[in-house]
C-alpha cells in the first residue's frame, strides 16, 4: 500500500533527477535556488496520488508533477517581490539576493518552464489538462490581486464571502487543480474528477483558515513565526472579518479603528486589545468550527469518490496531518 | 489576392471582437490598456499570412494570432518595468500609471491569457505547436537576460557573435515562431516550415540591425527619437561592436573609453566623437551591407519555399517596407 510518504519520495526523486541550471546563468541560478529550497511539495504529491487513485501510470505524470510545483514556486517568487518579503523558508528571497529585475525575469521563465514540463509527455487529454492548468493559473493571479486590493480597503468593507472567494482562488484552486490534473491523466470519469476537485477546494480553504487561526492562537515557538503579525499588519484575515459579524456595535467600531491604525499606536498594545475582543466573543471556537466544517466537506467529497479505498489512504493521512497541525 | 493589409485588417478585427476587461478590474485594466495601445501587430499578421501560404483555414488560427500578440505585449510590459522606460508607443507605461506590482501581476496574467487564446481552438498538432510557442517564449526570456547582462559589461568583452545571438533570441525568434506556428496549423511539411522559420530569423535580424543603424544615422524628425541615444546610454549595439572589429588600436581604445564613460563627460561631445570615428571608418556602409546580407538571406529562404507565388506577396511587401524604412 502506498502512503503519502511514498508519493513525496517520488516527487523528491523527480526533482533530484532534474537539471535547472542552464545559460545564461544569471537567469537560471535564481530558478535553481528557488526550486531547490524545498518546501512541502504538497501539490505534486497530491497530483501523483490522484493519478494512482484512478489507476494512472506514475511514469507518465512526472512532467506534470514538476510543472505544477514549478508554477507554484513561480507565484511565490513574484509574490515575495510584490509583498517585499525578505525571507522564504528561512532563506533570503530571490529579489533580496539578486535584485528586482532578476526576480521578475527568472519568475517569468519559471512560468514558461512549468509549461515545458507539462508539454514533455504526450497524453490523449492534452488540451483539457492544459486548460485546467491555465485556468487555475489565471485564478491564482486573480486571487493575488484581490489579496492586494484588501490591503488598502477598510476592514468593514471586506465581506466574509469576498474573503473566502479570495483564498479559494489564491490557495485552494491550485491544490484542487493538482488533484484534477492527476485524475485527468489517469482518464478518470468526469464525476469522480469533480468530487476530487471539491475535496481539494475544501482542504485548501481549511488550510488557509488554519493559517489565519495560528497567527492569532498558535504557539509561536512551534508555529515558527511571532503570533499577532496579521494584527500588526492590519491584515483582513478570516479572524477580524468573522469577529465583525459576531460582535457588538462598540466592538465592531473598535476593531475597524484598530485595523486601520497606522504607526501612531503601540503595536503590542494593539495586538493585546484585538486579542481581548477575540477572546470576549469566543472567536477561537468559532473559527475552529469553520475549519472543522471545511474538513468535514473535504471528507464527504473523498468518501463519495468511487475508487479503491486503500488508494484513498494518502488523502486521509494528509487530512489527519493538517487537522492536527500546529505550524 | 490577399496583401499584407488584408491580414492586418483581420488582426484588427480579432482584437476588436475580444473583451479584455474582467474582474478584478485592477488586474485587467492594465491588460486592456496594453492590448489596446496598438502597435504594428506584425507577429499575428505574419502568423495569419503563413497559415494562408500553406492553405490553412483563417478562422482556426484567430486564437493563436491573439495569443502570439498577447505574449509579445506581456514581454514589452515586463521589459518596460525592468528598463524603467516611461513611455511605450508615446503613452505612459503600465508601471508608471499603476505601479510596479500591477505591472508584475498584470504581466503574469497576460502570459496566462496568451495560453488561454492558444488553447481555445483544437488542432491535431497541439503539442508540437504549443512546444514551439513555449520554447520561443523561453528564448525571448534568455535574450532579455543577455541584453541586461551586456549593460554592465565592457564594450570590448561583448563579441559580435554574442550580440547576434542575443538579438536572435530577443527579437528574431518570436517573428520566426509566429510564422512557424501559422504554418504548423496549416499542416505544412517540415522542410517548408524550416525555410519559413529561417526567413523570419533573417528578417528579424535585419530589422534589429536597422534599428541600431537608425539610432546613429536616422533622421530624428522621421525616426521619432533623438539620434545617438544608444551612444549616450553606452549601449553595446551592433554599431560600436562592429566598429571595434574594423578600427585601429587607437580608435578601439577610444571607443572602449567612450562607451564606459559615466556622467563625467559632456553627452553631446561624446556623441560627436563616436560619430566621427564611425564616419572615419565608413561604419554606415558596413552596417548597411550587413543588413542587406540578412535581407538577401531572408529573400533566398522565401524564394525556396514550395508554395503558390501569389501567396508569398505579403512577405515580399513586408520585406520591401522594412528595407526602405526610415523609422
Image (cartoon, coloured by chain):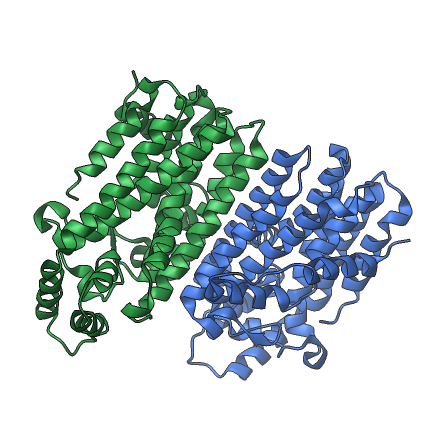
Chain colours: A blue, B green
Q: In the image, residue B258 lies at what x, y percent?
A: 18, 72
Q: Nearer the viewer, residue A233 or B307?
A: B307
| Residue A164 falls left or right of residue A180 | left
**x then y, percent, for residue B323:** 20, 38
Report the side of A80 relative to A187 (left or right): left
**x 29%, y 69%: residue:** B156
Quarter-of-image position of residue B253: bottom left
Quarter placement of the N terminus of chain B: top left
Residue pictured at 90% horizontal, 49% vertical: A310
Whether residue B273 is visible: yes
Q: Nearer the viewer, residue B125 or A173?
A: B125
Q: Nearer the viewer, residue A219 or B217?
A: B217
Using the image, determine if residue B6 lies above or below residue B39: above
Considering depth in this image, is B327 or B28 the residue closer to the camera? Answer: B327
Q: Is residue A231 above or below residue B201?
A: below
Rendering quarter of residue A190: top right
Residue B17, can we see it? Answer: no
Q: Quadrant of the C terminus of chain B?
A: top left
Q: Is residue B129 above or below residue B212?
A: above
Q: Position of residue B130 (x, y in %)?
A: 53, 38
Outermost residue toward the top in this view:
B1
Where residue A186 appears, as percent x and y from the top left, is: 76, 39
Q: Quadrant of residue B264?
A: bottom left
Q: Residue at x 67, y 34 (%)?
A: A125
Amino acid at each position: 500500500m502506498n502512503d503519502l510518504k511514498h508519493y513525496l519520495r517520488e516527487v523528491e526523486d523527480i526533482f533530484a533527477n532534474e537539471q535547472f541550471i542552464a545559460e545564461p546563468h544569471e537567469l537560471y541560478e535564481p530558478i535553481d535556488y528557488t526550486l531547490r529550497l524545498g518546501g512541502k511539495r504538497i501539490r505534486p504529491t497530491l497530483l501523483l496520488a490522484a493519478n494512482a487513485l484512478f489507476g494512472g501510470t506514475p511514469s507518465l505524470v512526472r512532467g506534470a508533477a514538476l510543472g505544477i510545483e514549478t508554477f507554484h514556486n513561480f507565484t511565490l517568487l513574484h509574490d515575495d517581490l510584490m509583498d517585499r518579503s525578505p525571507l522564504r523558508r528561512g532563506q533570503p528571497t530571490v529579489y533580496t539576493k539578486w535584485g528586482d529585475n532578476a526576480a521578475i525575469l527568472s519568475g517569468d521563465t519559471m512560468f514558461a518552464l512549468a509549461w515545458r514540463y507539462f508539454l514533455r509527455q504526450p497524453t490523449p487529454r492534452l488540451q483539457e489538462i492544459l486548460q485546467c492548468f491555465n485556468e487555475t493559473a489565471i485564478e491564482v493571479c486573480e486571487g493575488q490581486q484581490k489579496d492586494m486590493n484588501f490591503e488598502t480597503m477598510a476592514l468593514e468593507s471586506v465581506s466574509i464571502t469576498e474573503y473566502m472567494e479570495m483564498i479559494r482562488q489564491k490557495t485552494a484552486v491550485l491544490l484542487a487543480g493538482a488533484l484534477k490534473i492527476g485524475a485527468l491523466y489517469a482518464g478518470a470519469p468526469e464525476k469522480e474528477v469533480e468530487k476530487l476537485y471539491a475535496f481539494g477546494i475544501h482542504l485548501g480553504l481549511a488550510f488557509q483558515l488554519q493559517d489565519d487561526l495560528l497567527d492569532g492562537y498558535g504557539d509561536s515557538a512551534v508555529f515558527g513565526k511571532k503570533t499577532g503579525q496579521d494584527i500588526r499588519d492590519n491584515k483582513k484575515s478570516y479572524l477580524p472579518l468573522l469577529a465583525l459579524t459576531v460582535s457588538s456595535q462598540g466592538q465592531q467600531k473598535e476593531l475597524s479603528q484598530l485595523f486601520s491604525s497606522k504607526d501612531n499606536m503601540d503595536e503590542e498594545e494593539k495586538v493585546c486589545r484585538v486579542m481581548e475582543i477575540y477572546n470576549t466573543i469566543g472567536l477561537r471556537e468559532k473559527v475552529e468550527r469553520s475549519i472543522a466544517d471545511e474538513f468535514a466537506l473535504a471528507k464527504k467529497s473523498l468518501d463519495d469518490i468511487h475508487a479503491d479505498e486503500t488508494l484513498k489512504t494518502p488523502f486521509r493521512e494528509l487530512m489527519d496531518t493538517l487537522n492536527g497541525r500546529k505550524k
